[in-house]
Amino acid sequence: MNRKSTFLVIILSLFLPEIVSAQVDEIYVKKVGVDSLITFLKKEITPDIYYVRDTSDVASYTIRTSKSNFLEEAFRELRFNGYNISQYDGHWYILKNMGFVSELPKGYFEDKSSEPTDSEYLNYLNNKNVLVTFQNKIYEIGEKGAGKTGKVFVKGYVRDVTSGEPITGVSVVQEGGSAYAQTDAYGFYKILLPVGEQQLNFSGFSLEDTKLNLIVYDAGGLDVVMKEKVYALKGALISSESSTNHKSNKIGIEKVRINRIKNIPAVFGEADVIKVVLTLPGVKSVGEASSGFNVRGGSTDQNLILFNDGTIYNPSHMFGLFSAFNTDVISDIELYKSSIPTEYGGRISSVLEVKGREGNNKKITGSLGLGLLTSRFHLEGPIKEDKTTFIVGGRTTYSNWILNLLPQGSNFTNGAASFYDMNASVSHKFDENNSIHAYGYYSHDSFRFSNDTTFRYQNINASVKWRSNFSEKHSLVLSMGFDQYGYRVEDSYNAASAYSLASIIQQGFLKLNFKSVLNEKHTLTYGLNSLYYNLRPGMYHPFGGESLVQAKDLATENALESALFASDTWQVTDKLSFDAGIRYSLYAALHPAKFYGGPEFRVSGKYSFTDQLSIKAGFNNLNQYIHMISNTTSISPLDTWKLTDEKVKPQNGWQAATGLYWTMAGQYDVSLESYYKKMYNYLDYKSGAVLSMNENLVDDLITTQGKAYGVELMIKKPIGKLNGWISYTYSRTMLKEMEDRGTNTINRGEWYNAPHDKPHDLKMVGNYKFTHRYSISVNLDYSTGRPVTIPISKYMYAGGYRLFYSDRNAYRIPDYFRLDIAMNIEPSHYLKQLTHMTVTFGVYNVTGRKNAYSIYYTTNGGTKIEGHMLSVFATQIPYINLNLKF
Amino acid sequence: MKHISYILAPLMLLFTSCIYPFEPEGIKETSGIIVIEGDIIAGGTSFFLISYSQELTDITTLKSIVHAKVSVESSSGEVIQGRITYRNSQNGFNIDTRNLDIDQKYRLSVLMNDGEQYYSTWQTVEISPEIDSLSFYPDETNEVMRFYVSTHGDDNQRYYKWTYKEDWEYHSHYNSFFFYDYATDAVYEYPGTMNRYYCWNNDYSTSIMVTNTKDLTDNRLINHEIYSVGRTNNKISYIYSVEVYQQVISEEAYTYWVTLSKNSDDAGGLFSPQPSELRGNIYCAGDSTKPVLGYVGASTVTSKRIFVDQRKTLFWRRTEDCDAPMILSSLDWRKYYNYGYDVVDKVEEGMGVFSVYWAPVRCVDCTKKGGTKLKPSFWPNDHI
C-alpha cells in the first residue's frame, strides 16, 4: 500500500487493433494492440516480461521479422511508442513513458523470490529514486507538428496508483513560471502552459514532489498516477502543502487528509473528524465531549459544515463523544477560517468541507473496524471498471453495556444509548469530461433513560452532482440535494402530561458553479446557489391516551436564500496575485414576506518574495440568515433553529486578516496569521426565556455583537519520518449586548468574555514513523480555561440557600491540558495477503490530568456553599482499535 | 433541557469521571445585598423576611433585619404597617392583609434604617383555586414517598406555586418508663403519662415548587408531583402530615421562580443554561441600579392537609440500629450517663433486687432527634 513512486501515462489518439499471425521462422504481427503484443511476446519469445497494463494506449503495432529478431524489433516499436524497457535480473520490464533504472542498490532484492509478481514489481519501481528518473525523461504533449505558439491548456487527472481514486489538492506548478493549478475533488487539474520545453511540478500532502520534463506542442492531456508515500527517502525534497500556502491567494485555509486524521489519537480510538478540526489553530471548543466548535471567535452555529455538498446540522453522535462522519469514506477535510470562497455563504464564521471518497475503480475492497464502543465497515469498488464506482459505509455502537454497568436504582438501568450512520455514493464517468456523482447519508441517535423518556435525532442528506469540462476553457459543477435534521422526545412519566416534542429542519438546494480560465492571468469562478428552507421549529403533541397535553405546532417557517457570485483569480505578476470576489446574497422570508440581502466581498492578495516566502492579506464579510436557538454553552441536540424573519435580523460579520508564510529548509512550513473580526446580531436570551415551544420567542430574544482578534503561529512538518504540526494561538473573543435594556442589560451593556474565549492555546500533533509498519502519534492540547459565570454570594430564600451570580463569564475554570499517545501498527507489506490488519492502541489523557468539564455548587453542612468541578476523562483512558482491510 | 444532563450523567460515569473542589482564582465574593422574601397574602397574614446576602463560605446562620419599617400599600393610598414577629426561627414582619380589596393593586414598601426606601412593583391580587386533592404514593423502585397535588382553575390561573408545612410524630426506639436522675444517682419511674417516647417535629418546604398549565387543553393538574420524602426519612416513621399551600402567581413571577430554581439547581454544566440575570420586582427608590433580591407577589392562598400513617403504608424503613440494652451495675451509672446512655427499663429480679437496662440516649429519648413534646392541636391521636 505504501509505495513511493509516480508513474505516468500520456493519452494518445485512438487506433483499432487487429489480428496476429505467425509463420515458420518469420513472425508477422499486424495491427495488434499493446496488450496482445505483449501477451504474444510472453507466450512465444520469453515469459520473463513484466508489464503494467495501460488501457490508455491504443496504438497498434505491426511487426514482421524473424523470430530471433522479433523481441528486439518489438522493443524498438514499443520504445518508439513511448515505452521504456529495462532489464533486471533476467526479467524485462516494460513501462509506458517512464524510465526504469537499473542502478538499484546492490543486493536490494536479493531475498526476494526469483519470480517477481506484479505487486513486487510495483514495489521494485517504488523503491528507486524517482527524482532522477523523471528528470531524465521527457514527455511530449500534443502533435509535434502542431505549429502552435503562445499558451495552451494541459489537463488531466491525478489518481492513486492502486485504487484509481482521484487525489485532491495536488499542486501543479510550472517551474520558474507563474502557471499554477490544483486538482479538484475529482483529481482534475487544468493548467495553462507556454508552448515549448519546461518542467512541471506535482506535489501534494503525503506525496513526493514529482518534477516532469515536458515538451508542449499543443493542448493535451497528462494523467498522472501518484502514490502515497510513508516517509521520505534520502534526497527527495518535499514541499507539498507549502506550495498551497505559497501559491493560493487565500488566507486561513487548513486541509487535513484522512490518513492524518486516522493517526491522531482520539478517545476510544475512533478516528474523529471534528476532533481533528479542534487540533487546528484558531479552532476551539467549550469542552471535551461536546459537539460543535468555534472558529476564530465565532459561535458554534456560525460554521457551515458540508459533507459532499449537504449541510450537516448536527455533526455529532452521543452528544459530542463521537463525530457523525465515518472516516472510512472520507478523503479529506478542508476548513476555511478566513478567506471563504465566494461559492460558499450563509454562515459568518467558517466553512468546514468534509469530502467523501470515490470508490476504488479497479477492484472491490473494503474494511472493517472494531473499537471498544463502536465498529464500522466500508466496501467500495467498481460497478463497471474505470467507469462506475461505488462506496458504502456504516457505523454502529454497542455502548448499551455502559448503562448496564450503572448501579441499580440509579434510574438509568433501563436506559439505552445507540447510534448508527450510513453512507453510500456512486460515481459514474461518462467520458473524460463528464461525470455524475450521487451521495446519500443517514445518521441516527437514540437514547432512552428509564422506561418513560426516549430521545432521538437524525440527519438525512442526499445529493446528486454533475461535473463537466464542457469546453477547453470552461467547466461546470451542478449539484442539487436535500438535507434534513430533526429530533423527537417522548416523555410518558406522568400519563396526564405525557408528550412528544419534535423539531425538524429541511432544505433543498441547488448549486451551479462555473470555472473559466480566461487567460494566463485570469481565472473566473461564478455561479449561483439557491436554498429553500422548510423549518418546523416545534411540534408538541399528547403522548398516549390519557394525556391532557394540548397539541401545539409552532408555525412553519419557510424561506428562500439565493446568491449570485463571481470571483477572479488574477495573477498580476509572478509575485503578486489577487482573488477578488463578490457574492450577492438575497434572502426572502415567506409568510409574511420580508427581504434581506446585500453584497459580500471576498478579497485577498498575495505577494511572494520567493517561492519559499510570501505574505497575504484579505478581507471578507458574510451574512447569515439562520440562527441556532440554544441557551446552553455547548451544542445540544435539542437546539432548534430560527430563520430570519421580519423581526429577527440576519447575523453579519466581517473579518480582516494577514498572513506570513515561510518554508524553512524545504521542510518546515511556518505560518503566522492574524485577524480582526466583528459580528453583529448574534442571538442571546432574556432572563427566564423559554426557548422550546414558544410562539413568542422573538420577545425573549436579545441581540449581541462580538469582536474577536488573534494571532496564530503554526509550524508544520508535513512529511518525513517525523511529521505533524505545532501551533500557538493568542486570541480574544468578547461579546456585548446591542440594545440597552436598563438594569436587565447583560453586564450593564459592557463587553464580556464569550463562553469560548480562551486566550492562550497550544496544540501539537506529531507522528513518528519508525518503519513502514510502526509509528507513534502524539497529540497535545493546552488552553486557557473557559470563562464561567459563578455565584459570588448566597442568600436564604424560599426555605433554602440561593445563589447570586457574578457578571457574565467573569471567572474561568482551570486551564486545560491533555496529552494522548497512540501506537499504530500498519499491515505487513505482503501485498498478496488477502486482508491487512491495522492495530492502533493508545492512551487518551496520558498524564491523567483532571480537566474540568463542568462546575457546580453544593451546600455543604447546611450553610457553606462549595464549588465543584466535574472531570469527565479524569484518568488515562486506554483503547485498542482493530482495522481490517480487504 | 434537563434531559441532556441526565443523559450525559451515566455516560460520564463510565469515563471514570471525578469530582473535585473548584475555587476560581481572584474570586471577589459579595455580601450585603438586600434580600426581601414574602408574598402579600390576601385574606390572611402576610409575612416578610428581610436579610442580607452572605459570602459563600460564611457559615454563620442568617441574621434577619428588624430595623426597618415594612408596610403594604394599596393603589388607593391605604397603608398597612407590619410589626416584628418571630416565626420559623426568624424575626420577620407580620402584616394583617385579611381585608384587602381584590380590585386594587398592592405593593410592599420597606424603609431601611439607613433611609433607603425599597418598593416592589404594583401587584394585582391573584385568586387561587381550591386544591382538589392531595395524594401520596410509595414508590418502591426509587425508594421515595411521592406527594401529588390535583387542582383545576379557570383560564386566567395558569401558573401555580406551592409551599408546605409538614408535621410528623416519631418515636424513640425504646419506650422507657424510667429515667436516671444525676443529682441523686438514682432511677425513677415517670409520673403519669410523662414520657420521652412520643415526639413531634415540623418543617417548612425548602425547594421551589412551581408549574404551569398553559400548554394543557384544560387548566387541570392531575396528580402533579410536588415533592418526595426518602424511604428512610424519620418523617414518615409513624404519622406524617402535610399542609400544602397553593397560590396562583403571575407569569412574571413564574419566570422569576423558575429562573431562581434553575440558577440554584443546575448551573455550570455544559448543557445547563447560562445563569440568568435574576431581577426580581423590588427596587431601591434612590438608586435603581442597586441590586435587590426577591419577588413580592399578591394572591389568595388555599390549602389542604393529608396524613400518612406508617401503620397502613408499611413503607418506612428503619436504618438506625439500637443494640440490645445492657445491664449496668449502679456503680457505673454516672459514668455511662456521662457517656451518653440512659435508662431503658428497670426490672425487678425478685427479693427487691433490680436490674437496670441502659442504652444510648438517642434510643431512649426522642427529643434528642430534633423534635419536641409539643403536639400539634390537629393531631389525630390521644397520647402525649
Image (cartoon, coloured by chain):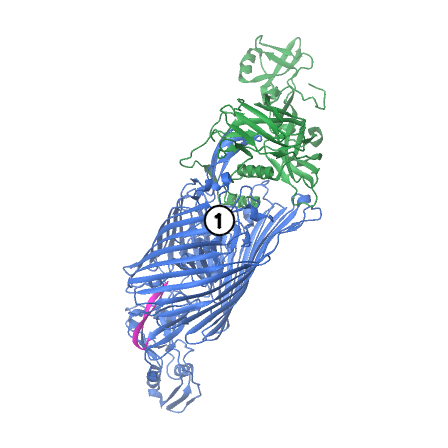
Chain colours: A blue, B green
Residue A204 within the magenta-colored segment of the rendering:
yes
Q: Chain of mark 1?
A: A
Task: Tell me the kind of residue under disc 1.
Answer: Ser
Residue A161 in sight here: no
Q: Is residue A17 above or below residue B147?
A: below
Q: Is residue A791 above or below residue A161?
A: above
In the rendered image, residue A776, in percent from the top left (x then y), is placed at: 37, 54
- Total marks shown come to 1
* Main secondary-structure element of the magenta-colored stretch: strand
Crowd class of label 1 (few under 14; some 14 to 19; many from 20; radius 10 Å): many
For numbered disc 1, what is the local secondary structure?
Answer: loop
Nearer to the camera, B333 or A761: A761
Question: What residue span does the magenta drawing correspond to?
Answer: A194-212
Task: Name the quadrant containing residue B320.
Answer: top right
Q: Is residue A106 above or below residue B70?
A: below
Task: Name the quadrant containing residue A800.
Answer: top right
In the rendered image, residue A724, in percent from the top left (x then y), is placed at: 36, 56
Residue A218 in sight here: yes
In the rendered image, residue B282, in percent from the top left (x then y), is placed at: 55, 33
In the rendered image, residue B26, in percent from the top left (x then y), is placed at: 40, 35
Image quarter of the N terminus of chain A: bottom left
Q: Is residue A599 above or below residue A71?
A: above
Nearer to the camera, A568 or B281: B281
Nearer to the camera, B122 or A214: B122
Nearer to the camera, B69 or B146: B69
Residue A454 within the magenta-colored segment of the rendering:
no
Residue at mark 1:
A290
The extreme front residue here reads B76
